[in-house]
Amino acid sequence: MSTLTVEHVARIEGHGTISVEVDNGAVGEIRMDIVEPTRFFESMVVGRRFDEAPLITSRICGICSPNHAVTSLKALEAAMGIEISERTRLLRTLLVHGSFLQNHATHLYVLAAPDYVGLPNFIPLAESHPEVVARALSIKKLGNDLTTAVGGRPVHPITAVVGGFTAEPSRADLEALAERLRSVAKDVAETVGLFSTFDVPKFDTAGEMLALKAEGEYAVYDGDVCALDAGWCRPVGEYLDFVSEHVVGHSNAKHSTIDGRTFMVGALARVNLNWDQLMPTARIVASKAGLRPISKNTFANNLCQAIELVDAAERCAMLCQRLLDETGSSKPVGYKIKAGAGTSATEAPRGTLYHTLAIDDDGFVTAGNVITPTAQNLANLEADMRAFAPTVVDLPEEQFVLRIEQLVRAYDPCLSCAVH
Amino acid sequence: MPAHVAVISLASDFGCQVQITNLDDKLLAVLGQFELSYWQLASSGHLPDTYDVAVIEGAVTTPEHVELLKRVRATARTVILIGACAVTGGIPGLAADGFDERLGCVYGDDGTLLVCGRISPMPVDSVIDVDYRVPGCPIQPDELVAVLQRALMGLADRPQREPMCASCKVAENQCFYEHGVVCLGMITRSGCGAKCISLGRPCTGCRGVAADANLEYARQVLVERGLDPARLVTALQLYNSLQEAAR
């Protein structure tokens, strides 16, 4: 019996260690230890003023900070019964889609792609595939510029507050962004093309898939939570009734199940559940790349992230145009601080993100709960590793380990989110 | 020969490392000046036995972090801290108050099962001497580049001494105190161009307390505006709860 260990798996956000026991060609125990240090965010918001909560929770993760900020704002607005303007909703939706552009481009090119071209990291790609690097950086920069225009900077937005925005992008900014978003269409379509050429294992997850769904849009800002296999849709406010979190001894991140079953959230789940709501070009590009729902191949999550890049670019251009065409204000609406508890969810790049915040009459936070996408995925990720490892155990050790790492990176795990 | 750089992360949200990748078009030019020896976020491989420059993100929250930092200090010629977590303890520092109760509060009775030990959060300079600090939550990529250049040329760290209000005057921002809103611009280290204030948000002090900050005068300003001076300290706790000024 030998145990193969990958300490601090590279090219993922946060610290995790994979260990696989192999005995005479048979796979024994296999697990992913999440050693990312606990920061106790849910306890940190308690006692702080309500308007500091989005500032604090967005520090759970520097990669998807716009998502944490927006989800916290929504939870506070739900707690105090605050109705935001349509323009605020549009801007927040743009911020969330912008974070998809930013994140997916980073994960696909900087973190995942080196696996498929046999390189340890992104930098040597600049010599071997300069056109790919140029494309990657231009998409990522566009995502950053978009989140900067709306949120004030690429990491940890400034302008989004309870009830609205303290500043908006100028007309000139929106016009320039819309133009750039339209002209990036070719680059994002080529990203789908590139990822469709990568040789991925044929491996279907046995887990359930969950994502938000809403009438008439590719749900990221609002919607009900829907389960692909079980076929149900439930309001976000009930999430604590269907998602159960439990502590496991080898992980600082809790594991989640629904009805005792592991499940997957993220791009693959969203594309499966929201296929009809994707922008037509995204559907065409996806079909050309050979992806049609329902796909249960975990490795197809990366291809779905690329498909979401196509969707996000076109959708963000449309949102910019709507903001240019429509009047209305995103200035924070007036509200009275009052006691209450609110729950909300958005789709972060890695999947559905839930926040609950309770405040007292003076506006101080009395309780907080956060369930992040990666925390929901971890039990399914381990189940996948157990099912997948025996299918590649005959490969040379180095290749075997790489395949397991690739499976982990297909999830685009964010361990600082998962632990928080 | 180019300097070998290792990027090391403690307890953080990785946002400052993301800001390194956000150098975008400058990224390859900047990284081209170094030999990247280790960067878990972006590259396979392990922390090598030798390197010249350590770039550290995150607060100290485990005994392993303390051991790692001692090893890093014994290895690296230059230690650069990036971000509020590393420099002041940042947001993770908020957990230091009542630290022992927090495990049960978040994880319930099963909390003792969790892997790796935990210690009350600390900034990196509580454990080792450091050479350069790039403050902020998150850091500004340009400031990191400037500090790296200084480090490569062997120049000493040169922190901005003047507070944010100076940048605000240049940006012609309206003062939040005119609306009775507490802003930490009077005492916060400048250098971000007063970004938050220019976008309609008061300064929350993520860059740390300026070396020449006049805390007594700042308290007096609150009193003169009819505000409770204790609010200055509460506001300061957000990113600086482990610093003397917030106690």
Image: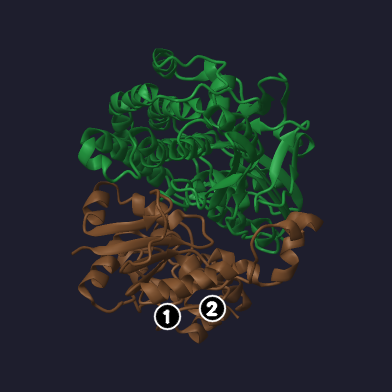
- The amino acid beneath tag 1 is Asp
Chain for numbered disc 2: B
Find residue B8 and report its image quarter.
Answer: bottom left
Q: Secondary structure at mark 1?
A: loop
**Host chain of mark 1:** B
Residues at discs 1 and 2 both on one chain? yes
Residue depicted at x 36% and y 38%? A114
- Colour given to chain B in the rendered image: brown
Q: Is residue A210 left or right of residue A306?
A: right
Q: Which residue is mark 2?
A: B243
Task: Name the residue carrying label 1.
Answer: B129
Q: Residue at coordinates 72% horizontally, 49% vertically from top-left? A: A248
Q: Rate crowding at label 1 as few (under 14), some (14 to 19) or many (20 or more) other CA atoms within 10 Å.
A: few
Q: Give the CA separation, mark 1 to mark 2.
A: 16 Å
Could you tell me if residue B213 is visible in this image? yes
Q: Which chain is green?
A: A
For marks 1 and 2, the one nearer the N-term is 1
Tag 2 secondary structure: loop
Q: Nearer the viewer, residue A412 or B15?
A: A412
Q: Is residue B195 left or right of residue B184?
A: left
Is residue B242 positioned above or below B10 on the image? below
Front-most of residues A387 and A374: A387
